[in-house]
Amino acid sequence: MKRTAVLIILGAFAFAQSASAQTLKTVKDRGLLICGANGTLAGFGLPDAQGKWTGLDVDVCRAIAAAIFNDADKVKFVPLSAKDRFTALQSGEVDVLVRNTTWTSSRDTSLGLNFTGVDYYDGQGFMVRKSLKVNSALELNGASVCVQQGTTTELNLADYFRAHNMQLKSVTFATANEAVKAYDAGRCDSYTTDASGLAAERLRLANPNDHVILPEIISKEPLGPAVRHGDDQWFDIVKWVLFAMINAEELGVNSKNVDEMLKSSNPDVKRLLGTEGNYGEQLGLTKDWVVRIVRLVGNYGEVFERNVGSGSPLKIDRGLNKLWNKGGIQYAPPVR
């Protein structure tokens, strides 16, 4: 009986694996990628008045669509709150979650998700009014801090104050938008979130120049895409789309020169762009999958600069997000 029970369980598991390994087919049959996004965060995921989405996370979704369809616009963006984002992915409402989400052990192991990589290395910080005359987060003892519920931010805040024996008056809100509005209205001394978010939210305040972001970074926040457990092919595709964008920047392949680079004799470039080998076919994609990504969306550096870097209103320094050979830690396994 025990052996029979084990065989039944293994058979059921195999069926579940087979049944769930359908995401690419589902996306192709639908003719559209459905991407879970932020919807309120400039630089990462935000629609304009005409409904056009822009942002670093948005461009990762567009790159996935480009690799599959040779059309970066075949994406439907679903705005998700921090509270609803994991449920939407688990239930199949979205094909992939690319929503400034921190990769943690508990999320990776207990929610039925797989994180596919890091598209932005971030860390939590604090914003205060200049009139408060505070120069360090260590001077916030007894301060009231606006924070969004159900995020790693809320836990990090409590941990930081506890570790430094400081008194905290945490004021929580269901959404980041509510927390920012409350801070802007003077209900809190400080607002805390990822440093990239602080740069974006500061621009939305009534008087941005009246506020300053403090220098301390109190946490590690590796942000990246996530997919459901059970479909290794889809996991590989989302993972390698991001890796391809990073490798393209490292090899000097960008949206302006990609067609010329197809003539390159560099073995690494030839493998990346599909003029040698069958690396795209191994993913279930076409030989020119990376050409499609770079031509239609750009390499990682291009995506960073226009959305959050020097070419954007946020003007965030690349810092840790520089390539590994340029002083940062962005690094991708090779296409080989």
Image (spheres, rainbow, N blue to C red):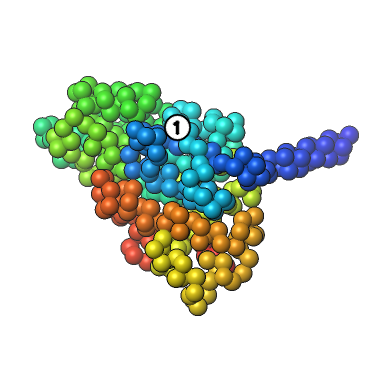
The quadrant of the rendering that contains the N terminus is: top right
* Residue extending farthest bottom: 265
Residue labelled with disc 1: 79
Quarter of the view holding residue 92 = top right
Q: In this view, does 254 lie above or below 191?
A: below
Foreground residue among 227 and 79: 79
* Residue extending farthest right: 1
* Residue 143 visible here: no
Quarter of the view holding residue 260 = bottom left
Q: Which residue is drawn at 32% across and 36% down?
A: 193
Foreground residue among 228 and 46: 46
Foreground residue among 137 and 129: 129
So how many labels did they put on this image?
1
Give the x, y percent position of residue 125.
Answer: 28, 40
Q: How crowded is mark 1: few (under 14 residues within 10 Å), some or many (20 or more)?
A: some
* Residue 264 visible here: yes
- Residue 17 appears left or right of 194: right
- Residue 17 appears left or right of 107: right
Give the residue type that dot 1 points to.
Answer: Pro
Q: Residue at x 38, y 44 (%)?
A: 55
* Residue extending farthest front: 50
Q: Is residue 57 above or below residue 257?
A: above
Q: Which residue is drawn at 49% across and 49% down?
A: 72
Give the x, y percent position of residue 292.
Answer: 51, 57
Q: Residue at x 41, y 60 (%)?
A: 255
Give the x, y percent position of residue 275.
Answer: 57, 70
- Residue 295 appears left or right of 88: left
